[in-house]
Image (cartoon, grey):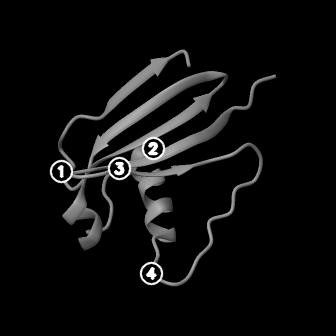
Amino acid sequence: MAQALKLKQLTLKGFRKDYTVPFRNGLNFISGPTSTGKSTIMEMINYALGSKKHKDYIEVKASCTDVELELWLKGELYKISRPLFDFEKQIKLFKWNE
């Protein structure tokens, strides 16, 4: 039986480079010193999954344009792409075979 939902990776699409957080099978921990982006990762996942807005992160706004979340849903691979800081723009949903 396929898992209902499993994250594959979160990507912040940058102007000069992308920032990617891969997720592994099983339990994933996000740890690190204060002000290193742990809460930002969680909020970007929440935003990609449908939250209406996210906080105004100065560092993210200065270097990133979109958030992408790749996930497995009932055995099918999807990618959600959503613009950052423009909450009226369209959300894109892609489904594909890996």
The mark closer to the camera, 2 or 3, is: 3
Residue marked by disc 4 = 35
Residue marked by disc 3 = 18
Residue 49 visible somewhere in the drawing: yes
Q: The residue tagged with tag 2: helix, strand or loop?
A: loop
Amino acid type, mark 1 = Asp
Q: Residue at x 33, y 61 (%)?
A: 54
Residue marked by disc 2 = 49
Judge the density around disc 2: few (<14), some (14-19), many (≥20) Cα neighbours within 10 Å. Answer: some
Of all residues, the one furthest to the front in this rendering is 16
The answer to whether the residues at label 4 and label 2 have Cβ atoms under 8 Å apart is no
Estimate the x, y position of residue 73 in percent, counting from the top left: 61, 28
Q: Between marks 4 and 3, how big is the CA–CA gap?
A: 19 Å
Amino acid type, mark 2 = Leu
Q: Earlier in the sequence, mark 1 or mark 2?
A: 2
Q: Earlier in the sequence, mark 4 or mark 1?
A: 4
Q: Residue at x 55, y 35 (%)?
A: 71
The mark closer to the camera, 4 or 1, is: 4
Q: The residue tagged with tag 1: helix, strand or loop?
A: loop
